Amino acid sequence: MSLNIFICGVGGQGLVLLTTVIGNACAKSGIKVVTGEMYGLSQRSGAVSVHLRIGKDAFSPLIPYGEADILLSLEAIETLRYLEYLKKDGIVLMNKRIMHPPIETSKLITEKDSKYVTVEDIVYKLKEWTQNIAVVDALTLAKESGNARTENTVFLGCLSALDAFKVKEKDIRESISEAVPKKTIEQNLKAFDLGKQSAHGSLCTLVPCRPLP
Amino acid sequence: MVLKDILSKEKKAAFMLGNEAIVRGALEADVKVVAFYPGAPTSEVLDTFSDALSNFDYQMEITTNEKVALEVCAGAAFAGVRSLTAMKSVGTNVASDTLFVLGYTGVKGGLVIVMADDPHAHSSQSEQDGRFFGPNAYIPMLEPSSPQEAKDMVKKAFEISERHRVPVIIRTVTRVNHQSGIVQIGELNRGEFKKVKWKELNEEYTTLGEVARRKKLKMLERTAKLAEEFDQSEFNFTKQADSDVGIVTSSVSYLHVLEALRMLKLQNKVNLLKLGTTYPLPKNTIKNFIKNLKKVVVVEELSPYLEKELCGIAKEANPDLAIFGKKTGDFSEAWEYNPNVAAKGIASALGLEYTVTEAMVEEAKKFKETIPARYPTFCAGCPHRGTFVALNQALKIQVAKGQEHYFSNDIGCYSMWIYPPISRGDSSLCMGASVGVANGLSHVIEERAVAVVGDSTFFHAAIPALVNAVHNGNKFTMLILDNSVTAMTGQQYNPSTEFTAGGRQGKKISIEGICKAIGVEFVEVVDSYDVKGNVEVFRKALDYDGLAVVVCRRECALYGDRNKRRRGEKIVPFYVDKDVCKRPYVCLRTFYCPAYELDEDRQPRISPELCDGCSVCSRLCPIQSVKRTEVKA
Ligand SMILES: Cc1ncc(C[n+]2csc(CCOP(=O)(O)OP(=O)(O)O)c2C)c(N)n1
Ligand code: SF4
Ligand code: SF4
């Protein structure tokens, strides 16, 4: 069986780097992996997504509808944009962070009773699709690691806690050290650990995890 | 990928992007000259060669356009040196004048052209199907489905190119270029770069009239030989099953088909022919495959290229064969495929049930409708935002005075001006066309035409149209947005940067210098961040009774940020002083910087993580409520 992870977020959040780190770690662990990456254009703040497929019987770079085991969203609103990929009752691993697109804000200033979408709204809606929702305050954890730009690595930590994620931790750590800018290796490793720990409070109550050492 | 794998001397398994695998394949083939103009989805080929440059002895150029890139490579190949270029689908249109003659002249050194189509127009102006370049120019074409195949085919393409003395096209699609996977990399045996003595080669590369007619016959012979050779190619393979049904496919569709067969529980239950050499087609291989079949389903994106060929071959080899594909309506010529599209098409061709996921997609749609769209927009700190805000204000003043406008946009980050919330633009075609079109419009419309191009686009394709305008006395306004780099494709260097491939020194070329030298009489240079000041300059340029050019200069914010980080400089964010802000919303209404949102009191708030510190919003606030964060020394 393959593990299918659909990753989404906003340009500039480091989805591609996250994919690279996981892919490299798979190569080290001798695990087959294929990805399909949609960068959008090169600007920040557009929608970005990656199909990540780990395991032998994944062929296409694109996950078939309804076959993603995990929908990982680095930005909360984006979660609702790709539900067709997620299995019914699949896992949503979602950032608490919302980046309101300018179009939403411009509506707020023209329409008095218009309101921003909130994380609660999003979770409420998601529950129609799945009950397995873990919300991660990745920005806070990233800042705690000393670098606000490590939200992606926090999520990698969360993933690494999962039983179904067969990549060896040693290989992930090595891969982080090879892929991120030298000056930020320490911060990224810390973000990874913080992410892993946080999973044990939330994600791991939903799905089987590896025990903490 | 990490650069380490690109440089690795040993054989091993590495995780690579399709584009990186292309680079690795070329390096293993000892490529010596590479030249590119960037364009999604091939830009990472350029970027990777540029990053690796200091470790190797190949010559690399980031050229002004694709035609020049191909010619740089042709020059090297004429002298027997291996060369490679990569371009996006529409880049091939620009290079095609040269491409067609190379079929006639041939080459000596291996010349490989990576041509990446973009089904779904993810990052292109059209869904052009470039496979027709192969047969049209008599240039052989290979199509990989995965990074591994991409690497292997590039390497093999150099051999084919030299054996048959013809360039070889590697035709990819976005989902191959931007697919990553495990690639078995081979040995890296690099020879030393040596200059060649041209006279000693005794070669010629001419074609015209009588010579062309002679060479055409040779070209036909060459193609026949290639077709025979491709019948033996490892890039075409079959998977046999005990069935009278077959599927013919190529490129990434092959991977979607494998997935679809799994989903339809048809694995090992139908025959499969995967084609890797799609021009010339391996006719005998295809004949043998279809000989004993009753039904064949052709799965290919865009036009029915294989399907048509197959119909022709079947007439001879198996006239009763039922062929399913686009003509039968099982597949569409529009948009890219995925496993579900492949499964649905195969099921419909074979009369099987397949409905499950459609309901899911429908249901998911409901959720999408509840969230705001996230259009691509200018980055925080982008100079284009300032330019357009000033231009909009100038246009408004002009409209009040009775002057109306046609807005001729072009291809670059500034194309995003067509997206909400600030949708604007009367036309936007292909690189450089904004200026060409403005020439024509200036003859026939009463309004003033305003053409906009970026620095890269200016050098790529706008200069001839500008010369034309001066020569013919055409009157319009042209803005040249000089942000130092080719931003939209990933901030590559261009003639407006003082650097070139690999970060080496390059000669920076003055855009205003060119305009003046051509004879443009109104040429102004402004700072894109000076929104207020620029309104007046733009107004003058709109009023000017002649051709008026304004060069709007300021570095791309992403490029600038990267430089700042490298130099260890901090980006100092701005903030809205809540006590001062009375919510006139000028910042939001006119500027739409993505760093802005509203707080609980519906006052604008700037996310310090997103703010680029450009200061432009602070200059626009009528009550000075936007301030720079104090930094402790
Ligand atoms: C013929 C062709 N080649 C390449 C591209 C890819 N492409 C899209 S925008 C762009 C360049 C944009 O550079 P510039 O004009 O300087 O604008 P910027 O993005 O920097 O604002 C390129 C190369 C294309 N669309 N057409
Ligand atoms: S990449 Fe550069 S030019 Fe393009 S939108 Fe961002 S800042 Fe502007
Ligand atoms: S200073 Fe203002 S306009 Fe510039 S990036 Fe920050 S919030 Fe945006």
Image (tube, coloured by chain):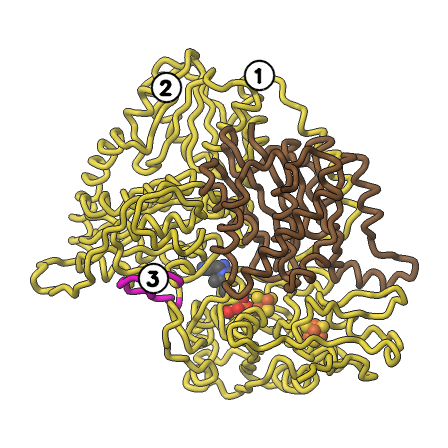
Chain colours: A brown, B yellow
- Residue B584 in the magenta stretch? The answer is no
Q: Disc 1 residue type?
A: Gly
Mark 3 Cα-neighbour bin, 10 Å: few <14, some 14–19, many ≥20 = many
- Characterize the local packing of mark 2: few (<14), some (14-19) or many (20 or more) Cα atoms within 10 angstroms: many
What residue would you read off at disc 3?
Answer: B35
Q: Are marks 2 and 1 on the same chain?
A: yes
- Find ligand 3 in the image and state its quadrant: bottom right
Which subunit holds the residue at mark 1? B
Q: CA distance from mark 2 to mark 1?
A: 20 Å
Classify A117 as above or below B55.
above
Of residue B249 and residue A161, the one placed in the foreground of this image is A161
Type of the residue with mark 2? Ile
Q: Quadrant of the C terminus of chain B?
A: bottom right
Q: Earlier in the sequence, mark 2 or mark 1?
A: 2
Real-space Cα separation, disc 2 to disc 3, in angstroms:
41 Å
Q: Disc 1, ligand 1: is the CB inside 8 Å?
A: no
Is A164 drawn above or below residue B158 in the view shown?
above
Q: Point out residue B31 in the picture as x, y percentages from the top left corner.
A: 26, 55
Numbered mark located on residue B290 in the image = 2
Left or right side of B82 for B20: right
- In what element is the residue under mark 2? helix
User: Is A208 left or right of B583, judged from the image as shown?
Assistant: left
Magenta segment range? B51-64
Queried whether the magenta region covers residue B54, the answer comes back as: yes
Task: Report the residue that reaches farthest toward the right.
Answer: A113
User: Helix or strand or loop: what does disc 3 sit on?
Assistant: strand
Q: Which mark is on residue B538?
A: none
Q: Which residue is mark 1?
A: B351
